[in-house]
Amino acid sequence: MNTLKAIFSDSVLRSRILFVVVILLITRLLAVIPIPGIDASNLAQFLEKNSFFGFLNIFAGGGLSALSFVMLGVGPYITSSIIMQLMTVISPRLKEMYQEEGEVGRKKFVQYGRLITLPFAILQGFALITLLEKQNVITHMAVPVLITNIIIVTAGTMLMMWLGEQINERGIGNGVSLIIFAGIVAALPNKLGQFFITFDASQIPMLLGILILTILVVAGIVFITEAERPLTVTYARQSRAGQGSTFNTSTYLPLRLNQAGVVPIIFAISILLFPQFIGQLFSTSKYGILQSLARTINDLIANQWIYGATYFILVVLFTYFYTAIMFDPEKTAENLQKNGAFISGYRPGAMTAEYIGGVLGRITLFGAIFLGLVAVLPLIVQGVTGIKAVAIGGTSILIAISVILDLIKKVDAQLSMREY
């Protein structure tokens, strides 16, 4: 209560929080304005049968469930950001811009991401509208109407991206993450309503078990997100007084257990969505070979064991991959050496880099396995209980908790800055 009182007594912080609330309300309003030509009954049936669109709807901020003009949400922006991160591995110039040129370099890096968001939004909008048209969710469109709708959904994506950046500049927290979070929270009343419609008193013991599991999952996510492995670092300091004696001061280098955050799950979903999209698109093709290919893909995806195992493996692999992008042991060892610091028992330079890399690899394994388990948890719950309405959305919970923890830290930082 004291923290809340401090927040609302600070005029700057209060205005930032109110700005975020207003922007999120605008995004929720935009998410219910549909594009022209939608068959509402076919849309409801289609969404009920396709878990594929459930994943897309998370990154659309809930706009896909109503086929609003912001139905792509921030998905294309996330895709472009991921590709820009991957490009840092290929292009030394981009890596230098992102990691070494400070705030100016990062702004330029983000600007490149904005520029490639536009073509991604056009391509994704065309693909999604075409798919929905084939499934009779959207009525058949003439070419001018199709082009108009693509322009509308592309403009919606660019607007959502701009609103997210306004939160970054004038509000508090990460704008894109908060928009996704708002979509997840907005879907809760509908999910609870579906649950109570199908509620059966005989399921109460099982539901209590799911509730306990949910609490444990939330606690586990908080623990893993906040967990660090400290490496003791010693700085040699020289005193100019008297004989110029030297003394050592110690601090520590924090290695996060989960360096990659929720990004590996987003990577894995992006990879898994592609074959699902192909399967949906070709299922109504007039060519027999394409229909056969679509049936094969859909059968493989329908097999929960194959789908779950593939999802888990992709999350683990991408956790290592993204951690390697975000944290460079050689660069860290070089910076320690430049500042006169060393890790006790290891020579500065290559030996220190090798030690840091080894520790990071071991702790990342634990974090990667945990992320993979959280990702496939809905499939495990559905398989064990057979209840789909209350399946724990591992990805949604992970995103929501990560956003909340980040927001709490930034609010605390703002309060501390005001005090000093």
Image: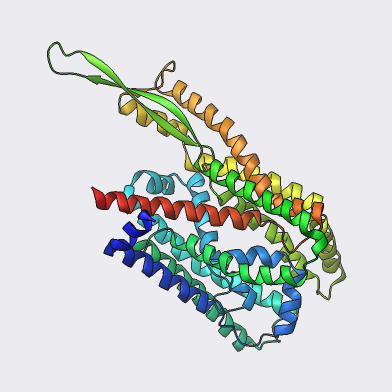
Asked if 36 appears above or below 303 in the picture, the reply is below
Q: Nearer the viewer, residue 123 or 169?
A: 169
Asked if 339 appears above or below 143 in the picture, the reply is above
Q: Nearer the viewer, residue 217 or 296?
A: 217
Residue at the (55%, 67%) spot, across then down: 120
**Residue 2 image point, x, y percent:** 35, 54
Q: Is 398 on the left-hand or right-hand side of 104?
A: right
Q: Nearer the viewer, residue 121 or 269?
A: 269
Which residue is farthest left?
Answer: 242
Residue at the (47%, 35%) spot, across then down: 255
**Residue 50 image point, x, y percent:** 74, 68
Residue at the (60%, 88%) spot, across then down: 144
Residue at the (46%, 36%) spot, across then down: 328
Q: Is 337 on the left-hand or right-hand side of 377?
A: left
Q: Is 27 on the left-hand or right-hand side of 414?
A: right
Which residue is farthest top?
Answer: 243
Q: How many marks?
A: 0
**Residue 312 image point, x, y percent:** 70, 46
Residue 84 visible? The answer is no
Asked if 88 appears above or below 4 in the picture, the reply is above
Residue 29 visible? The answer is yes
Q: Quadrant of the N terminus?
A: bottom left
**Residue 128 image point, x, y percent:** 65, 73
Asked if 81 appears above or below 351 in the picture, the reply is below
Instruction: Specify how the rendered protein is coloured.
Output: rainbow
